[in-house]
Amino acid sequence: MNPDFQHVIRRRRFLSQAGLGFGSLALNGILQADTPNAKTGGSAKAKNVIWLFMRGGVSHMESFDPKPALTKFAGKSIPDTPFAHVLESERFKDQRVVVVNDANGKQRNKIYPLQVGFKRYGENGTAISDWFPHIGSRVDDIAIIRSMWTTDNNHGAQVQFHSGRHMLDPRVPTIGAWVTYGLGTLNENLPQFINIGPRFFDKRDGHYLGPAFDAVSLKIDPKNPLNFAKPQGKVTPEEQEETFALTNRLNRLAAEQYPEDPVLDARIKSYELAFNMQTSVPEAMDFSKETEATKNLYGFDQKETKPFAQQLLAARRFAERGVRFIQIMHGDGAAGAWDQHSKLKANHSKLARQVDRPVAGLLTDLKQRGMLDETIVVFATEFGRTPGSQGADGRDHHPFGFSVWMAGGGIKGGVVHGATDEIGFHATEHPHYVTDIHHTLLHQLGLDPHALQVPGHKRLERDFGHLIPQILA
Amino acid sequence: MVAIAVLLGSFGFLPSSMAAPDYLKEVKPLLASRCFDCHGGLKQKGKLRVDTVAAMLERGVVNPGKPDDSELIYRISTGELEDRMPPEHEGALFREHEIKVIRDWITAGAKGPEDEKPEASPEDHWAFQRIERPEVPTIEDSEFKIRNPIDAFLAQKQIKHGLKPQSEAQRSLLLRRLYLDLVGLPPTPGQLESEKTFEVIVEELLASPHHGERWGRHWMDIWRYSDWYGLGEQLRYSQKHLWHWRDWIIDSVNADKGYDRMLQEMLAGDELDPGNHEVVAGTGFLARNYYLFNRTTWLDSTIEHSGKAFLGLTLNCAKCHDHKYDPISQVDYYRFRAFFEPHQIRLDAVPGESDFKKNGLPRAFDDQPGAPTPFHIRGNPSTPDESREIVPGVPELFASFASEPEPIELPVEEWAPGVRDYFQAGEIEKAEDELARAKEGLAKAQEQEGKPKTPKPESPAKLKAKPTEAGKGFSLIDDFERERSDLWKVVGTGWRYQGGDLVQLEPNREEQHVRSVKPHPGDFELEFRFRTTGGPTYKSVGIRFDLTDDGKNSHTVYASAHAPGPKVQIAHKVGGRTNYPAHAKVEMPINENTDYTLGVQVRGHLVNVSLNGEFLIAYHLPNRFPSGKIELMAFDATAEFDSIRVIPLDGGVKLKPPTGGMTKGGVKAPAATSIDLAKANLEKAQAYLQSLRARIAADNAAYRSQGDPEEAAKAAALAEKKYAVAAAKHEVLETSGGKVAEAKKKLASAKKALENPGSKYASLRGSFKALETPKHKEPQYAATYSRTSTGRRLALAEWITSRENPLTARVAANHIWTRHFGEPLVETVFDFGRSAPKPEHAELLDFLAIELIESGWSMKHLHRLMVTSEAWRRSSSNLDADPDTYAYDKTNRFYWRMNPRRMESQVVRDSLISHAGVIDLTMGGPSVDPGSNSLRRAIYFKHSRDQQSQLLATFDDAEILACYRRTESIVPQQALALTNSKVSIDMSQAMADKGAKDPETFIKSTFLRLLCREPTEAELEECATFLTNVPNRARLVQALFNHNDFLMIR
């Protein structure tokens, strides 16, 4: 149709693969030239994102959406309660089965009482469970969305939460990849998109945008935070610096033989970043210059909280240094630690202790440094858990209604948006599909989700999601 | 085409609010995106087309000047669900501002261009036309060198656009290009200097077995090769031993098997040449799609990737609704599925191995010939349309050359794989070995019984003598402060010396260990300090001794922090099999992050184990392996090793005699005498061999008409029951404690069964069927299968590879071109449907496709054509390019120069080890752990979601879900990998050590080797200066590893 079409694709293919600061910026420039809608026009409210993801499925009723009715009707089958209607929802049709005849992923309609009490916090008296008292104390900074839904009743929903697509669909870029694709970097010495913590179902992000938009995985190990960051053999730092410099000079000399070679230019740039990353990444993960007070704010002083505290302090330090998207995964195992098919009380309370203080500490610290205005913190999970019991003391996967929250970057604090029904079964008031979170995030970052597309890869309406205006300041 | 229109539309120029919207730029793209698939060239629902203004006016859906009176506006803006367009589930609604654009256009008079053409009908799509041999253009201009028709087709375009191509690359660069392109290994200096003609070298390389590895890897990308993966031991995706298929690919490429034949063997090798494992191995393609949890998901993958890889059709887009662009209905999707519906996957035993965990051929077979194919309404398996009967078939547009499936009678070894001669013989051999071992065991037991109470090896005299002989002066003491390659050989990933410890950071269950360089004395004492810091499940840390060099025999003493059952255990490995005797363990808490000192003392067959100085186990070793080595192990664990001390056992040390079985409570298990046990074991082995022979006879009678089936079955049933009794007797003697009662019960029922043996017996199971759901267990499947195959897959394969099929050869030729020239002729390599515009070089593509077909689908023929073309031999540089040519065609659409390509991940890594001269060119066989320091070619590394080489991943390794084309990213981690990875550092050192002494000669030869060119004066100077500052030549080599001209195929 258009004779230049292939040419455009080739150029994009090249640019999207040159995963560097300048590459993304250049790409961004092209996007803007091609698409006047690339930006909303409104100024960006936020610069970066700290994305906290609780793997396995946090019970919404025992975290941010307490439901006293569960205790009241404990032990009854849902059809024997006034809420029998929840079992006749259209939404069941949206479910897509990944594992046929799985013992898990059922609706479980015998009501299981709340396993924890709750208190009211903040100016609006928002109910939050007693497992999250520290986050409760920050409730005036956060907007809770109690009406999330998704369509995968198994842990592939982790993929879905990040990409908007069901596990059985082809893989598409995740929210972190789109953010970095759209915005480029703020710091040429650091990767723009990092991941700390376990992943399982999909370890990539960029997909058709290319590996340049995959998160760079980092470990909380100041000695070896990044793959290949340290020589796996005897090489002195001085030697290494000289070697990098020689490569650089030789590549520049080669440009005489190969003029106007965009790949060569990109490679020279990427070596500079590589060299810098060797010091800038460990520097960002070196906590020695942080005060004891700061460290303890995050929970370095307790064995239980220390691992997550370290990750979140690192997150703040990366945000400070301009990393765009900082993805922190919590909860080991294939399914994720929060997957309490049994022993919900014992395990959820333990896991909540691991994250509650560090997360609240992060919010406090960001705020006291004036960073919360420009940094969006998202606290999410792939689905909720069933109002009914599984076995003696567990809850099953529940995609029909669950909670996430957001804070900072122009998100209104002290807000509770949307609701599930009395027993937490369905998202009833302002239901939101997972990509609504993406849309809202992109909007606050000054990006129009509809402008984020590349030729040859059709995005669906559902991929773009909808803005949640009620939670904006 | 429509997709492009959408994009152009949304990227288009937005008018000021006053001007009438431009129909072509603004209105038509909107209609194209939402309406054309039902009201355009593909379909005309309600006999309506909206792909031209004329058609809309004629039908009256647009009333110029009166938007409110235009049905079009009503349809796209109404809230009435029944009237609204697009209908529910058929596409996104028009957005408000889009409706406004269309309204404004109608208000302004609904003007369109005079000569507007309706959308083409699918029959006219370029890629759906029969492939005909195009006429090769005659090029008169002698400026254009024409080596073969490829050049003529390209020259025609170049002349038309006034382009001047680059001249040929210098020979050394050309040879590098050729070697990397055809065999994936760089030329040696000798090969660079060869005076053979280019054409001769081409033939040599095409004939090289490494050509199959290079091009096999390309096809493995396209055909989605992945080793099995799942969760822990549970296989969820693909199949074990899929390397058989990888080897089939390599061998097929090397043999220049026709591409058509390869596809046939992949889809239906079992129907094409049933019983022939060399052909059946091709169906590994189908085995790769296996998915444990959901048959529909499994078949969806098979359909999607057969469509994309072989046909360039996105069949997957028709799963939930009719295809939006191509003439493929939703019913067609399920008819395509019906070709695959009967098939399942199994492992067939291969000669020499009947343990399916160790080997077996993954393959397809028709398990349920009559299985009905569902039709899922809107693609949802929970809403099948019961009223439809789905029979296999192809989309109508391509149906004229389809084959009808014809059922195929299978040879016996296909449906009763247990009767294969080698399998029966192998089973008998195993049983005979077992019998021999049992005899030996009895002899030993009798010998021991006859001896004095203290066995010989432990007699005091010997004890004193031994250490002074064998262990004289021996000591193995290490505090792990630093690497000691003189003491240890470290195998596996995740080991690091840090913080004064040797730590294991990456828990896994592979062969990972730290093995002593020297053997230990027969009698020794050992003290090992360690901490277990974590791990997924077993968290076992400890030591091995008596370890033979092949790793197949050893004794292990370890502490497991496995939460449900922590313990200290002695285990034995004999001939690769590990045994965990119940009476050689102590169940006790083992904590993570706690210092432990494990003590082991060995004298003759007696071993004493202590933990933190506290005695735990005394045990009699069933055997010893002289001159064995010590090994430190962390299995499924992360750990920190603090120190170890191994010295000869002093003769004066007293060891405790063996205890019996011990648990925390210290209860002793009464054991049968060893002679009784050995006798029972012998009887069991004898009975087993007899029953096996009887079962084989019965199988042969039943399935191969050798003898009377009824009599043979009775004999087999009787022999089997006798064996059951013998086995139960043995078990009664062997078990202890609470399990004895259970064993006795078993014996009673076995005796009972023997009274009335009947004629039912277990046929030999010569294959292992993949589980249909996780709830199934292998024994519930029959040992024999359907005696016929439906022939469906063969019919499908014949249709795909028909001369009349317009897609198959074009798609293949495009793939081959892409991998020689760096850019495809058809950009959407897996989609040749109507979304793919007619390519610039369509005639060239057709020429290549017809050459492929008419050469008997010879891929080597195409390789030869391509690499001997002038186009392929051109310089890849813009240097001295004609300025007008460069300005006109910067992205080289017209191939006026060669496209430089980045080496694929495998080529990068293989080049490093090849240049260092350490590459191991062994071909074929089981996949190798990518974390090992193996020097095999990278194609042999395990490649799955959970196992990928980190180095390869950094350089855009093949995506396992789908990889129709590799990406060529440029990311900083690549520079870090080539700077810091062990392989890069080691290989640079090896090259530095081997190089010439004189710096200048070294620099020049290194340039020549790595970049296949001489350094320029300036480069030489830079390098010489570097060597005076950094007197380590390995760093110079590494600088060149990171050179753009090394990573690029110039």
Image: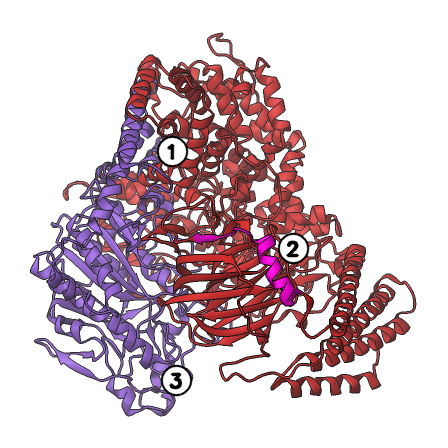
Residue A356: x and y in percent read 21, 71
Residue shown at 40%/30% (left/top)? B1047
Number of the label disc, if any, that sits on residue A109: 3
**Discs 3, 1: same chain:** yes
Left or right: A448, with B658 as reference point? left
Number of the label disc, if any, that sits on residue B359: 2
Residue designated by label 1? A6
Label 3: element kind: loop
| Residue B469: in magenta span | yes
Q: Earlier in the sequence, mark 3 or mark 1?
A: 1
| Residue A360: in magenta span | no
Q: Which chain is purple?
A: A
Residue B871: x and y in percent read 48, 20
Vertical arrangement, residue B591 with respect to residue B345, above or below: below
Q: Colour of chain B?
A: red
Q: Amino acid at mark 1?
A: Gln
On the question of residue B996 being in view, the answer is yes
Label 2: element kind: loop
- State the residue in front, B809 or A61: A61
Report, in whole angstroms, how far the alpha carbon at label 3 lies from the one at label 1.
55 Å
Please identify the quarter of the rendering in which residue B700 is found.
Answer: bottom right
10 Å neighbourhood of mark 2: few (<14), some, or many (≥20)? many
Q: Quadrant of the N terminus of chain B?
A: top left
Left or right: A32, with B951 as reference point? left
Number of the label disc, if any, that sits on residue B104: none
Q: Amino acid at mark 3?
A: Asn
Residue B606: x and y in percent read 60, 68
**Disc 3 vs disc 1: Cβ atoms closer than 8 Å?**
no
- Looking at the rendering, the stretch of residues picked out in magenta corresponds to B457-477
